[in-house]
Amino acid sequence: MHRREFHVFLLRLSAGAFLTRRLLAAARVGDSPSIGELYKRAVVIDSLCSPFPHIDASPSPELLAAMQVSLGLLGVITEVELQAREAFAIAERIEFWPLEEILARWDNEMSNRRHFSFFWMPAADSPDRLFMEYPDGLDMTDWSRVKLYDELPASSLDDGGSAAGADRLDRPYRIYPDPDFEGEIVGRELEYMVPFDRGKDAFLALRELVLAKYPDNKYPIEIRSIAADNAYLSPFYARDSISVSICGHKYLDYRGFLADVATTLDPFDPRPHWGKLYYLDAERVQQAFPQYDRFTGIREHLDPSGAFLGPHLSPIFG
């Protein structure tokens, strides 16, 4: 197995459960900072990493913070214990808003809604790129498909319960996933996290780039909010964030397009989604992650030979 493929394999080891994947690979799904962490953190992590036959991270807050998002750099994770919270239900509403409504309601919805996110559409047929339904006859140009999620007690699901005004009421794992892709996946995605209070400006800058320079790239821009956490390599470390993501088309010079996207977002102090394309070198990663030196020190201690680095991550963490 190629060493880069081995890194992907390591990340997929942590992907057997939805929560574990979010915690150990790319942190977690986005929700309003008003509720704190969507899922409580991993409280015990065991791994195998030469020259150490077994590592229990639970007694060390520092090691645990490094392990929580480790990118496969700290060995093979063999056990994860999660601190759970009480079960709950999600009431979902899907609405369609013009740009003016998005901007007018941004601050309140981002701060107070259990989950608020939207897909802004640069063209009438942009929803088709991600297999999204939209009202017949509505020109989606400069409109957004909006997700409004509210938390309800799990008991609201008893006896086929419903919620006033909701399109769906169900368990979170049934509500959160987007529609399945069909056919060849031609999208190549970049997702950057910017500070919460700079999210609106970052979105508008990216919107302007797409409209002015890339009219043929019809993929939506997805925007969502995420609460801060304390994992050293999490893009949400110690700051509430807004996620800004967009795809380029496999056959339309997506690398050039996404590099331009990255340049546009660079003034907004971005941090990357580690599982998607990004354009940050070691110097920029060190600037973006306050605990970069602490994490690399732990990595060098646990893996002095660099067995888990690989050609993709060694320029950044080697």
Image (spheres, grey):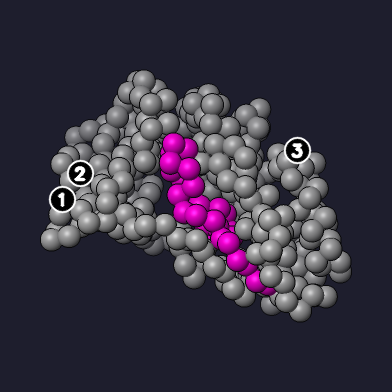
- The residue positioned 58% from the left and 62% from the top of the image is 43
- The residue positioned 44% from the left and 36% from the top of the image is 34
Q: Residue 226 in the image: x percent, y percent?
A: 49, 41
Q: Is residue 117 left or right of residue 162?
A: right
Identity, as a three-letter code, of the amino acid under mark 2: Ala
Q: How far apart in space, not on screen, are marks 1 and 2 (Cα)?
A: 8 Å
Label 1 Cα crowd, 10 Å radius (few <14 / some 14-19 / many 20+): some
**Residue on which disc 1 sits:** 162
**Residue 142: numbered disc:** none
Q: Residue lying farthest left?
A: 159
- The residue positioned 25% from the left and 42% from the top of the image is 93
Q: How far apart in space, not on screen, are marks 1 and 3 (Cα)?
A: 47 Å
Q: Given contact means CB atoms under 8 Å apart, are the residues at marks 1 and 2 in contact?
A: yes
Label 2 Cα crowd, 10 Å radius (few <14 / some 14-19 / many 20+): some
Q: Quadrant of residue 55?
A: bottom right
Q: Quadrant of residue 205?
A: top right
Range drawn in magenta: 21-47
**Residue on which disc 3 sits:** 287
**Residue on which disc 2 sits:** 166
Instruction: Please say if 264 is above or below 27.
Output: above
